Amino acid sequence: MEELLTKMRTLGHVNDLTKEMDNYLKHGTDRFYTYLFEADNPTIRSDKLYIAIRYPGATRGHIEIDKNYIITDIKLYNDACRLPHIYSDEILHCFEKYIGMKIVMEQTVKNNCIICDKHTYVNDYVITTSENKQKVIHLCDDCIRFSKLLNN
Ligand SMILES: [Zn+2]
């Protein structure tokens, strides 16, 4: 069983699927990116489990999973009247390889939050330093929520 490791980022959960989807964004990933809404808490609708695929502004589609978190289908919504086509059409070809993979949530580890210094369960957060290097910092949920409030 191939696992699709899914991690928390500022906007929501991301994994190789959402990162690959970002490659098909027509306008690129300047500030935002594709993410999953509460991948660890799927929506139940008529006996099926769904995880929303989001890009800021709208839900763009969903992942359908079974009770073991195995991906059974991936759909993009095609609502030409309401949703702008933010992905190029070639995106549909990338979904197939993810069918049958199991969504696994990254184990959160305790560490010191870079903002409040609380030793607690933290999320890895990738930032780009002034020297243009990628660096992983640790943020607790409270501080992530707080920084989201500031950004909105
Ligand atoms: Zn904190």
Image (cartoon, rainbow, N blue to C red):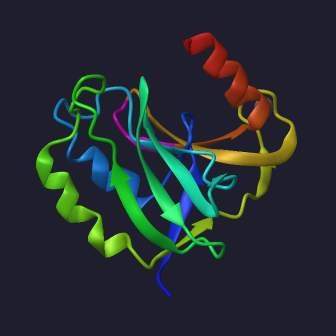
Range shown magenta: 131-135
Quarter of the image where one finds residue 11: top right
Number of numbered discs visible in the structure rendering: 0
Quarter of the image where one finds residue 109: bottom right
- Residue appearing at x 68%, y 30% in the figure: 144
- Residue appearing at x 41%, y 66% in the figure: 73
Name the quadrant where ligand 1 sits.
top right
Q: Magenta segment, principal secondary structure?
A: loop
Quarter of the image where one finds residue 70: bottom right
Q: Quadrant of the image for the C terminus?
A: top right
As drawn, the residue found furthest toward the right would be 119
Question: Viewer-proximal residue, 121 or 113?
Answer: 121
Q: Is residue 145 above or below residue 36?
A: above
Residue 150 coordinates in the image, percent (x, y): 62, 11
Residue 63 coordinates in the image, percent (x, y): 46, 57
Residue 110 coordinates in the image, percent (x, y): 81, 54
Question: Viewer-proximal residue, 16 or 128?
Answer: 16
Q: Is residue 132 left or right of residue 118?
A: left
Q: Is residue 82 above or below residue 53?
A: above
